[in-house]
Image: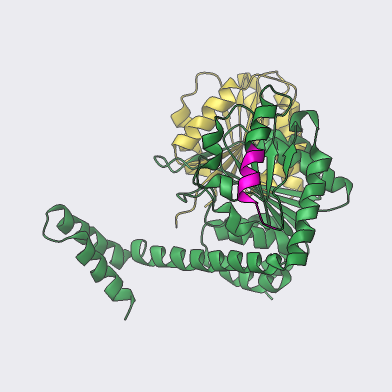
Chain colours: A yellow, B green
Amino acid sequence: MTRKIRVLVAKPGLDGHDRGAKIVARALRDAGMEVIYTGLHQTAEMVVDTAMQEDVDVVGLSLLSGAHMTLFIDVAKLLKKKGMEDVLLIGGGIIPEDDVPTLKKAGIAGVFGPGTPCEHIVEFIQKNVKQ
Amino acid sequence: MNALASQVLKGDQRSIARLITLAENSDILASQAMKDIHPHTGHAHVIGITGVMGSGKSTLIAELTSEYRKKGLQVGIIAIDPTSPFSGGALLGDRIRMMELATDDGVFIRSMGTRGMLGGLTSAVYDVVEILDASGKDVVFVETVGVGQAEVDVVKIADTTLVVLVPGLGDAIQTIKAGVMEIADIYVVNKADRPGVEQTEAELQSLVDISCSGKDRQIPIIKTAAKEHQGIIELVNEIERHQKYLKKSRLFDTQRRKRYEAELVEIIRKRLMNFIFDESTFKEKVEILIDQISKKELDPYTAADEILGKIIK
């Protein structure tokens, strides 16, 4: 049996725009991955607890409200605290270029802004997921 | 004892999650751990929930779980959604309705894709029930994919099977067809705050009157409106009543035996399939045979004999 890549697509915080997250979720599904989608308004604790129970390989965060510097980094810290550094953490949404280096340093391995073709995200995951 | 197994028995969340993944991938590491945990299983009451798409199964499970948590019980939830037969991927979205349970340590939720299995379940579901049971869960829910009429496998794994309907599904003839309607221990009419609920209830009642006539247990019909928190306590009470009935009538052991039979068959089926189709030498042989069948040099029955002849000596 081949191992399937499992991805949690989560929307942390109060932003209610989930069209992008759903489109990415669908693209990952079509690339043969198992995608767990949890809906809106997640706290960092909910995201990490879900990631643990679902034993995902990847956590993808989507945020369009501008709170990514707090919420993405909170998720990264909490993953580390629970010993889940092997989970590939990526994020997307309205994220200014200037913020990307700080996010990467905090452990968000890939950051994808508006206009990113879905195939880029699929490829990034396939290339960087821990085997 | 296997290290992973002993962590699972202690209820360690990460180990539970890891062992489930291994079992799902038919990993060799899983079978040793599964051997070690089996003696520690059998405590959890397994509740199967099945019904058409959009009937509110996930919401119902979330509500029932909150009720069990108030009683201090630990709950495991297995939520199954369909795997795409084309890409092999799946979108698992049952958790959306279970958000308020996400950070409760007494609840473990796992989403699974069907991964090619028909019947409404997924191949590793038997393992996952055992794992959650061994980890100390008192109640384990198994939510099937949204079913049509013939996906009835959940009855093999559940102690109590709930069939969830909603008002307005169709006329009385639908309720007397074979399949899903025959497996209920309890009927749930969810979204009972919607119009048409009396008709659905009446049609179900006439079905129960016919199918349970002369039997010592009538299948109860419970009306719920899960989103409005209505009817949940009544449903929990009815599940408990069924649990007591199973114990008293000794049906419990018969039913558990059926589960182990289904599990054993599934393990053998999976191993055989892997042996035939995954092992490289065999795979080549199979490809050659398929070519021959396509060219009419061979018929499918003779090809099957040839393959099985290599296994059964």
Residue at the spot 52% in from the left edge and 63% down from the top edge: B27
The x, y position of residue B256, in whole percent, is 65, 66
Q: Nearer the viewer, residue B241 or B45?
A: B241
Residue B231 visible in the shown view:
yes
Q: Is residue B117 left or right of residue B51?
A: left
* Residue in front for this viewpoint, A91 or A102: A91
Instruction: Residue B90: give x, y in percent of width and height.
Output: 51, 40
> Percent x, y for residue B232?
80, 39
- Given the current orientation, which residue lies at the most extreme front position? B214
Please tell me which residue lies in front, A124 or B159: B159
Quadrant housing residue B94: top right
Instruction: Kindly report the secondary structure that dominates the magenta region of the rendered protein.
Output: helix
> Where does the C terminus of chain B fall, quadrant-wise?
bottom left
Which residue is found at the position 72% from the left and 68% from the top? B250
**With respect to residue B204, does B211 lie above or below?**
below
Which residue is at 77% across, 47% downward? A81
Q: Please provide the residue range marked out in magenta.
A: B204-215
**Residue at 48% in and 31% down:** A27
Q: Is residue B299 above or below residue A105?
A: below
Query: Foreground residue, B183 or B14?
Result: B183
Q: How many numbered discs?
A: 0
Q: Quadrant of the N terminus of chain B?
A: bottom right
Q: Residue furthest right?
A: B71
Say whether residue B164 is visible: no
Give the percent coordinates (x, y) of residue A103. 66, 31
| Magenta span includes B51 | no
Query: With B174 as the anchor, is A56 left or right in this view?
Result: right
